[in-house]
Image: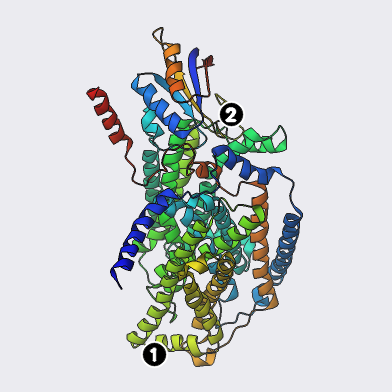
Amino acid sequence: MGGTPMRRKGAGIMADAQAPLRTPWILGEKRPIDVSNDICALLERKPTRLWWAALLASSTVLLIGMLAIGYQMATGIGVWGVNRTVGWAFDITNFVFWIGIGHAGTLISAILFLFRQKWRTSVNRAAEAMTLFAVMCAGLFPLIHMGRPWLFFWIFPYPNYRGPLWVNFRSPLVWDFFAISTYFTISAMFWYVGLIPDLATIRDRAKAGLRKKIMAFFSLGWNGSYRTWIRYEVVYLLLAGLATPLVVSVHTIVSWDFATSIIPGWHTTIFPPYFVAGAIFSGFAMVLTLMLIARKVMGLEDYFTLRHVDAMCKIIIVTGSIVGLAYLTEFFTAAYSGNPYEQFVFLNRAMGPYAWAYWIMVTCNVVSPQLLWFRRVRANLVAVFALSIVVNIGMWFERFVIIVTSLHRDYLPSSWADYTPTLIEILTLLGTFGLFFTCFILFCRFLPVIAIAEVKGVLTHGRSAPPLPHSQSDKTRHASEAFEEART
Amino acid sequence: MSRRVFLSVHEREEDILGVARAARRRGLKIVDIFAPYAVHGLDQAAGFRPSRLPIVCFLLGLLGAAFKVWFEFWTSAVDWPINVGGKPWNSLPAFVPVTFEVMVLFAGVGTVIALFISARLWPGKQATASFPGTTDDRFALVIEEEDAAFDPGAVRRLCEQFNAVHVEEREEEAV
């Protein structure tokens, strides 16, 4: 390389260091009133035909799923394809899949908030909603798995007439119940607290009527008082601080459901970080899928820009690479351990009867996301959309591979068995997609998909320079002003 | 008891920051500021004291964690000890995950409830804004006219320096 390209490269770095501070996250030179108008207009206009069609389609799928769930509740879970050897299969795969998707919302709202990533303001509302719906879908599976779901409350340690017989606090399944219910509650809190200022904006714009009444009820009399804003910001920060370890804990505990057992392929210490990275990976892919559709259908091009897509793609590369590294590490550990059972499980994964599932997983999760290293791919929304779906397919197969391949060949060759899902199981999975999309479509219609108040805070309007991450603090500003005054 | 207040409405973040800082430097008593979003640095500019909610959060988290450790110990080792795989009655390390979750639950839910109480927000409450549009794109500064020395003309000139789009004096019920 000659001197000139080197210099150009150096200039490029300088330009890059400057660029994120100068280019606005929201396009179109918006003023705060434009943000209110743009986002509220989506709720104030009549629903489009496309919206009705989407709602009809997703609620039909939901209905089919409900029928399948009703059938298996009435008949018993013998209608599944599971057997003595493969005792966990489709149901738990779907549970882990949905819980994983539910990780992106709180990651975006909490962790990116703590890291001061301003781009989160365009996606956090939709991602948090997605989290809630995904956790609802996830929660359905253990509930059905109980066999007698009407006794689900037995998992809760309440004083009862059976002793009282308490739950076993040493069991990861009990930890799981606490982790997921806490996660759902805190995510719902976070989402609602974030919504309050926006509900007040809608309330103040709405003409007298049902919408105004509902919004007035749920906006809690919010009037934009800055004394309240101070408390609000502190609470938001505290919730973010609490939710950050919570996100990590939830999938860690889900992974312990497996890792604390003595099944080869499950019993490894790599599971918690591996599961958490996988969860973020799949969650971001699902946020991208949904936001790219919402962007197109709802005309949010100015709010969810190519820069947002770019940032999210980069997170997908990072987490996808962690997942790929975890796959390699599992193989290395198995080879290095000298444990024949462990070695057999991993060779069987890659070359046994479920090798097709394993290689789908590797192709979708490790190979195809590498395309995102190219800027041109990241800027091509069709490609990103396709890749986001590929990642979700891959992550579903990851859970399937972990669960089924580890179980179907156990220590005793006479009990080896295979597993194929039944129609009922497939329809149940389909039904949760129906639930997820029905909820999301309703959300897009009745609540602001973009956090109005938060987006207003990152606009360039009304500021001589965009806020810098490490700008001069007010304390130093006061000091310099005092100095100026003393001089004159 | 009613009090007399001076209201100044602005359209830009820079202006509200500037006018709040200037008003504070002149020793004017800022009752409140109404803003459509959380303007960074406005709390320091206006001299509002920081919230004490982190203390509430900390104490509730501590309470939740302590309660859960005690509860898990009591149910597993005292009330009805059951031998599970030969594990000790008091399996403290196994109690950690649920303790953590309950700590987060108490701290999180409790802090939000504390916010609603301290900010006096409740479902169906009638919103009282000083000026329309403060949930949209207007910033309103409310200054209390404390005594006879208050000079509305000077304050008006100050606010106009910062591009006030509307100024007025009004009687207001003191909260």
Residue A152 in sight in this render: no
Q: Is residue B69 above or below residue B157?
A: below
Task: Give the residue drawn at x 39%, y 90%.
Answer: A340
Residue denoted by label 2: B127
Q: Residue at x 24, y 28 (%)?
A: A483
Residue in the image at 50% along x and 74% along y: A365
Spatial CA distance of label 1 from label 2 is 69 Å
Residue depicted at 66% across the width and 56% down the height: A297
In the rendered image, residue A174, in percent from the top left (x then y), is placed at 48, 63
Q: Residues within 10 Å of mark 1 (few under 14, many from 20)?
A: few
Q: Is residue A479 left or right of residue A44?
A: left
Secondary structure, mark 1, is helix
Chain under numbered label 2: B
Please identify the residue farthest to the bottom as the structure is shown: A414
Q: Nearer the viewer, residue B60 or A393?
A: A393
Label 2: how many residues lie within 10 Å, few (<14), some (14-19) or many (20+)?
A: some
Q: Residue A429 in the image: x percent, y percent?
A: 64, 69
Front tag of 1 and 2:
2
> Which residue matches tag 1?
A340
Question: What element does badge 2 sit on?
Answer: loop
Q: Looking at the rendering, which quadrant does residue B86 occupy?
A: bottom left
